[in-house]
Amino acid sequence: MKAKNNKMIQAIAYLVIGILFCVFQSGMLGWLMTAVGVLLVVMGVSDALSKDYVSAIIKIAVGIVIALGGWLFVEIVLLVLGIVVIINGAKQLLAALKSNKKDIKELVISIVTIVFGVMLVVSKWAMMDWLFIIIGVLIALEGVLMLLGKK
């Protein structure tokens, strides 16, 4: 029962996050940076309570920098995100090519993923809003599929 509740919560979270990505588009990046920064500070406080002071100091410091100054690092984050998307697409493409099934859908998805990654690296701001809308739709669809029991 607990696993089913966790899956439903995860599905609803995916749906909400996907909608937020579609509505706020590239503005979500600032929210994400703030959320990651706050999460790191909370993890650092937890480490401090567990008497792991070195880890606590590092997490709190990095969390504060990301939460307060994350928007300063947007260019770097976008470049890294583009590279990660390219790598993920390449891994998907290799897996699809190695597969005995040769699923055309997997090949197309992996190629589109690579193209978006390259476009994000080359023209960060031109693709940002569209990228966030597409990511939002995909995340929301994942949430819907999870709610319907398809995943």
Image (spheres, helix red, strand yellow):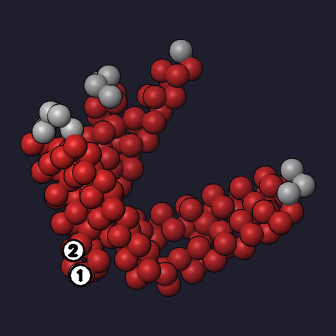
Coordinates of residue 49 in the picture (x, y in percent) = 87, 52
- 126 to the left or right of 54: left
Q: Residues within 10 Å of mark 1 (few under 14, many from 20)?
A: few
Q: Residues within 10 Å of mark 2 (few under 14, many from 20)?
A: some
Coordinates of residue 56 in the picture (x, y in percent) = 79, 63
Q: Nearer the viewer, residue 12 or 74?
A: 74
Secondary structure under badge 2? helix
| Tags 1 and 2 touching, CB below 8 Å | yes
Residue at position x 66%, y 61% from top? 40
Secondary structure under badge 1? loop
Residue 119's disc number: 2
Q: Which amino acid is tagged 1?
A: Ser
Coordinates of residue 137 in the picture (x, y in percent) = 24, 50
Q: Nearer the viewer, residue 76 or 103?
A: 103
Residue at position x 33%, y 37% from top? 143
Give the residue at mark 1. 123
Q: Which amino acid is tagged 2?
A: Met
Q: Which quadrant would residue 11 be assigned to in this image?
A: top left
